[in-house]
Image (cartoon, rainbow, N blue to C red):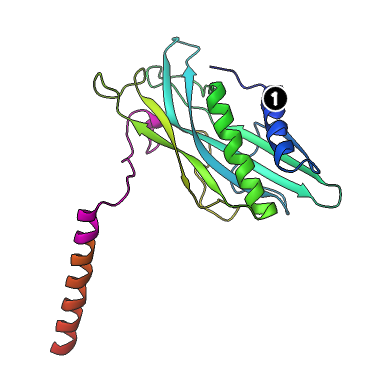
Amino acid sequence: MLDLDDHKWEQKFQERMRQEIPWVQWTLKLAKNITPDFLPWSWTQYQQRAFGRFLCKQCNQSWTSAQINVLCHINLDHQKSQGRVLLRSFGQKCLKCSSSRFENPEFSKKGITRILKNLAQYILHVYYGHDFEEVLVIWEMPLDGAPTRGNVVGFYLSGPATPKTKSSRSLCSSEMSPSSSSRLGDLLIPKLRRPLIPADKLIFICIVMFALIMSLYYGKSY
């Protein structure tokens, strides 16, 4: 796992953007003071969830989470051919320590690459009209029992996604707290998404037909 470092993030981000649009200079800075849905005019917002690791500095308890909120504020100056990104990853609290503070996440090299790939894809979609396909976070149940802080594993699945803008619903409004619905992202497991199988489609068709028949029946009754 790697600590957050401005130089590492910006270097990887610039390398990716130069491959796609070398005529525009893009910069990325890590920012601790940006919040969802509060951004200057002409800026846009992108949010995603990421997988990473936390370490409590009070009790040395560590845990992993695939519910880490990553917020980006983005601006492009077309006249100067310069783009800016402010990126913030939100912390989580240790459930073991009653007076714990928010700890910053650590990401692996692959995790950072996936975050920046999603960010680059979003920028290319919003400003340059490219297709947008986000690498989503999916949960995988560990083989050795129920999920805990130490054995929850996250993996990523590539698929189409709807880009989020400043008017979209925020993933988070502040640092995540122990009372949040995700319980710090490591105690509740979201349902896995899977493609529809023929049986699902048949059930769906039956439900629709039943609803149509009932509406016709009650329509005639009145």
Determine if the magenta segment contains residue 185.
yes
Above or below — where is 152 with respect to 123? above
Q: Which residue occupies the foreground of this view, 190 or 115? A: 115
Determine if the magenta segment contains residue 149.
no
Residue interval drawn in magenta: 179-203
Q: Which quadrant would residue 14 be assigned to in this image?
A: top right
Q: Which quadrant would residue 12 be assigned to in this image?
A: top right
What's the magenta bit mostly, secondary-structure-wise? loop
In the image, residue 185 lies at what x, y percent? 40, 31
Would residue 204 be found to the left or right of residue 194 on screen? Answer: left
In the image, residue 209 lies at what x, y percent? 20, 72
Above or below — where is 91 with respect to 72? above
In the image, residue 179 lies at what x, y percent? 38, 34
Residue 217: tell me if it is visible. Answer: yes
Above or below — where is 59 with respect to 153? above
User: Which amino acid type is shown beneath numbered disc 1?
Assistant: Asp
Above or below — where is 49 with respect to 126? above
